[in-house]
Image (cartoon, rainbow, N blue to C red):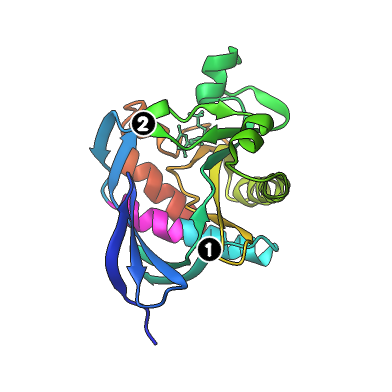
Amino acid sequence: MSIEKTEQLYEGKAKKVYATNDDRYYIVSYKDDATAFDGLKKGTITGKGAINNRVTNKMMELLEKEGIPTHFVKELNDRETVVRKVKIVPLEVIVRNIAAGSFSKRFGVPEGTPLRCPTLEFCLKDDDLHDPMVNHYHILACGWATEEDLKTITDYTFRINAFMKDFFLKLNIELVDFKLEFGKTPDGKIVLADEISPDTCRFWDATTHEKLDKDRFRRDLGHVEEAYQEILRRLFGE
Ligand code: TMP
C-alpha cells in the first residue's frame, strides 16, 4: 500500500505534519520558511526545505546504523518524508562542543571557545515562554518525561554527538552545537524525531571557521542559501 497524506495535523515554523492512510505513520513536509527568536524574525531560505529533508534523512539513516532508533521511515520526494507516528517529548535537547550562541551570551564564554567536555541542556518546548532551560527535577516534577525516558534520551544524545562530531569532521566541518527532539512510539519506545539540519545545528568550516548554518539568517550574515547548499554538497558530493 502506498502511504498518502490525508488531513494536515499541524503546521510548525519549518514543517507541516500530515496524517496518512496508515495510522502508524505521519508525513512531514519541509518548508522554505525560516524564523528566529521564537518566530519574531521571519524570512524565506530558497531551497531550504528540500535540503533539510535530505540532510535529516541521511543523518537518521546513519544513526539507525549506529543503533539509535529514529522516526525515519522513507523519503517520499524532495521535501516530504514518511515518519513513525510518535508523541513528541516537549523538550529541546541541546548539546554543545564549542561555546556559541546563547551559551556565550548567558555565561560570558567567548564564541569559539572549545569546551572541555560536551554539555547537555534541556529546554521546555514553548515559544510563548521562550523555551526556558529546565533541569532534571523540573522535568520529573512536571511530568514532561520520566526518569527512564531521560536516561535513554541522555544516553542516545551523547552517542549521537560522538558519532556526528566525527562524521562531520571528516567533511571538514566542526559540529559546534545542535538541538535534538525525541518522541515516544505508541508502544512506549523513545526514538529520535524532528530534524538534524543546518536549521538545528551549528556547523563551522573546520579550516576557515566560516558559519555554514542558520546563524547566517539569524545574524544577517548573507550567503544563507549558499551555506545550506554547501552542507548538502559536502554530505552528498553534489
Ligand atoms: P542557542 O545557542 O541559541 O541556544 O542554540 C543552540 C543550538 O540549538 C543551535 O545549534 C541552534 C539550535 N536551535 C534550534 O534548533 N532551535 C531553536 O529554537 C534554537 C533557539 C536553537
Q: Which SS class for mark 1?
A: loop
Find the residue positioned furthest to the top: 108
Disc 1 vs disc 2: Cβ atoms closer than 8 Å? no
Q: Can you identify the residue that label 1 sits on?
A: 71
* Residue at the (47%, 38%) spot, across then down: 125
Q: Can you identify the residue that label 2 sits on?
A: 38
Left or right of 81, for residue 136: right
Q: Which SS class for mark 2?
A: loop
Image quadrant in which the C terminus is located: bottom left
Most prominent secondary structure in the magenta stretch? helix
10 Å neighbourhood of mark 1: few (<14), some, or many (≥20)?
many
Percent from the top left, x then y, of residue 73? 50, 71
- The amino acid marked with disc number 2 is Asp
Left or right of 108, for residue 87: left
The segment highlighted magenta reads 47-55
Residue in the foreground of this view, choosing between 52 and 42: 42
- The amino acid marked with disc number 1 is His
Left or right of 229, for residue 175: right
Q: Is residue 17 magenta?
A: no
Find the residue positioned furthest to the bottom: 1
Image quadrant in which the N terminus is located: bottom left
* Residue at the (42%, 27%) spot, across then down: 130
Q: Is residue 53 magenta?
A: yes
10 Å neighbourhood of mark 2: few (<14), some, or many (≥20)?
some
Percent from the top left, x then y, of residue 48? 33, 50
Q: Is mark 2 within 8 Å of ligand 1?
A: yes
